[in-house]
Structure formats: structure tokens, C-alpha cells
Amino acid sequence: MSEDASISLPFADRHEAGRILASRLTGYAHRPDVTVLGLARGGVPVGFEIAKTLALRFDVFVVRKLGVPDPCAATSLTHASQFRSTAHKKRAEKSRS
């Protein structure tokens, strides 16, 4: 018996996991203001099954793991990105008025 054969997984695969999760999210079914985002790689099959089962829009969110040696540096990157995004929105709003 191989080592992998002794591992008990809660779901047969990610598609099954998505269907089971969808059964717990039925309150969101058919809502036009809801979009399911599947994170690229493992989350896409899960998100797809949720969106299909609940008749929701589906999109893929592509992410990339950052090779940051210091967790504080990663936090700084996140805050800087949010600041730039907010500053960009404010400039766009001013240019429209």
C-alpha cells in the first residue's frame, strides 16, 4: 500500500467540492449582483461548479505567488497597491467633474 492510498480526502475532486459548497450557498442563487471568482489553478473548478449550480456569473482571478522573504515586505506591497488604486480612483473622479 502506498503512502497516498492511506490519505482520506473529504471530496472526490474539486468539482465535487464546488457542488457541495454550492449546496450551502443557495441564498445567492440567480442573483445578478453576485459573481463567483475562481482563483487560478485549484479554485477554478470549484468556482465553476458553484457558478453553474447557482446560475451565477463566473470569472477567473489570476494570482501569482510573490517570492517575498519578509512577511512585512509583502504587507507593505499590499498597502502600497491599495494606496495607488485609491489615488488613481480619486484622480479619475476629479477629471470627470
Image (tube, rainbow, N blue to C red):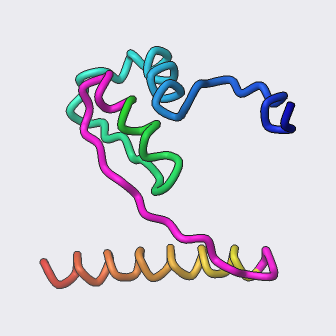
**57 in magenta:** yes
- Vertical placement of residue 18 versus 37, above or below: above
**75 in magenta:** no
* Residue 66 image point, x, y percent: 63, 77
Camera-side residue: 56 or 12? Answer: 12
Q: Residue furthest left?
A: 97
Q: Which residues are magenta?
A: 50-72
Quadrant (top left, top right, bottom left, bottom right) of the C terminus: bottom left
For the point 46% across and 36% down, which residue is it? 46
* Residue 83 image point, x, y percent: 50, 78
Quadrant (top left, top right, bottom left, bottom right) of the N terminus: top right
For the point 50% across and 19% down, which residue is it? 20
Q: In the visual, does 44 lie left or right of 75? A: left
Q: In the visual, does 68 lie left or right of 17? A: right
- Vertical placement of residue 76 versus 19, above or below: below
For the point 77% across and 25% down, which residue is it? 8
* Residue 63 image point, x, y percent: 49, 66
Q: Quadrant of residue 87?
A: bottom left
**Numbered circles on residues, count:** 0
Camera-side residue: 58 or 9? Answer: 9
- Vertical placement of residue 89 versus 8, above or below: below
For the point 32% across and 22% down, which residue is it? 53
